[in-house]
Amino acid sequence: MLVSYAIGFAQQPQNSAVPATQSQQLSAGELQKLFNSMTPGQRNSLFTNVKHIMDPEVMVIQPGTKDSDPPSDAIILFDGSDISKEWEEVARGASGVRGPKQATWIINDGGMQPTKSSGTVQTKRVFIDFQLHIEWKTPTGLTVTGQSRGNSGIIIQGLYEVQVLDSYNNRTYRNGQSGAIYMQYAPLVNVSRKPGEWQTYEIFYTAPRFKDSTTYFTPPRVTVVHNGVLVQNNVSIQGPTVYHGIPEYIIKQHGPGPIQLQQHGNPTTFRNIWIREL
Ligand code: MG
């Protein structure tokens, strides 16, 4: 189509906006030459025409009553009624992951939270690129500080952790606080609410594409909005989350993966979880 328009414009007197009707094969070099010969006015008309594309029409979906409600094309991962429908538990033994098993998290105050003996949970579904909405609150009355206070996390594709922590008047290392891509990127600001108050994350994630078994062609990228405020702006994740060491060294080619909610010894609670596959 672009070629037809370009030829048409080249054959018209200058300033004409009438497109050509015939089609002709041109090499990339010839097309470039043709384009270079056009006046600025011809180029503007050309792109005005080719940018007004009507079909296929953009898909219509229904928004929620509030922006925190799931739109019509969302997958509901937790609506307060049933944990086991979408979630399973990652059972860990002395030698590492041995799961999955039935989730032992409980429902409390409309949210799902781990018991003392629970493990990390993950979605039964797996995802590639997505938009995730999740609400969470850290427990009140804790006297511990730092990483021990309300620690959990949203672990994307089971590999990349967006930190969840009580970061309200609780200083810790900057790339380990709430809204951090754990140990890789500190949040742009600390917009934490108090313990016991519901907070939101909107997470926009593009999964990596791989060049080979240990190298990203394009790295995973993530944007995080915390309580309505941008805290991660399309950052490139360096590799799977590690607690010691260098993430680039442990990249391994992977496909779709689950969303995990980390059990870190605190009854941090999650509710209203929905996701849109992109
Ligand atoms: Mg964590």
Image (cartoon, rainbow, N blue to C red):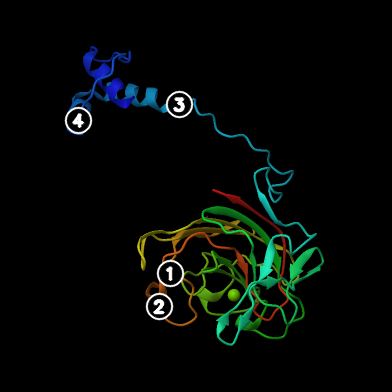
Q: Nearer the viewer, residue 261 or 16?
A: 261
Q: Residue at x 69, y 60 (%)?
A: 86
Quadrant assignment for the N terminus: top left
| Residue designated by label 2 | 246
Q: Position of residue 49 (x, y in %)?
A: 38, 22
268 sits left or right of 44 in the view: right
- Three-letter code, disc 1: Gly
Please identify, in this view, whether the residue under mark 2 or under mark 4 is nearer the observer.
Answer: 4
* Disc nearer the start of the sequence (2/4): 4
Q: Amino acid at mark 4?
A: Ser
Pointer 2 residue Cβ closer than 8 Å to ligand 1 = no
Q: How many marks?
A: 4
> Do the residues under discs 4 and 3 have CB atoms within 8 angstroms?
no
User: For the residues marked 3 and 1, what is the alpha-carbon distance in whole angstroms?
Assistant: 39 Å
The answer to whether 89 appears left or right of 172 in the picture is right
**Pointer 1: residues within 10 angstroms few (<14), some, or many (20+)?**
many
Marks 1 and 2 in Cβ contact (< 8 Å): yes
Q: Which residue is mark 1?
A: 239
* Kind of residue at badge 3: Ile
Sequence-first disc among 3 and 1: 3
Kind of element beneath mark 1: loop
253 shown above or below 31? below
For marks 3 and 2, the one nearer the N-term is: 3
Under tag 3, what secondary structure?
A: loop
Q: Which mark is residue 27?
A: 4
On the question of residue 233 being in view, the answer is no
Residue 183 point in image, percent of width and height: 48, 75
Reply above or below: 91 against 63.
below
Q: Residue 8 appears in which quarter of the rendering?
A: top left
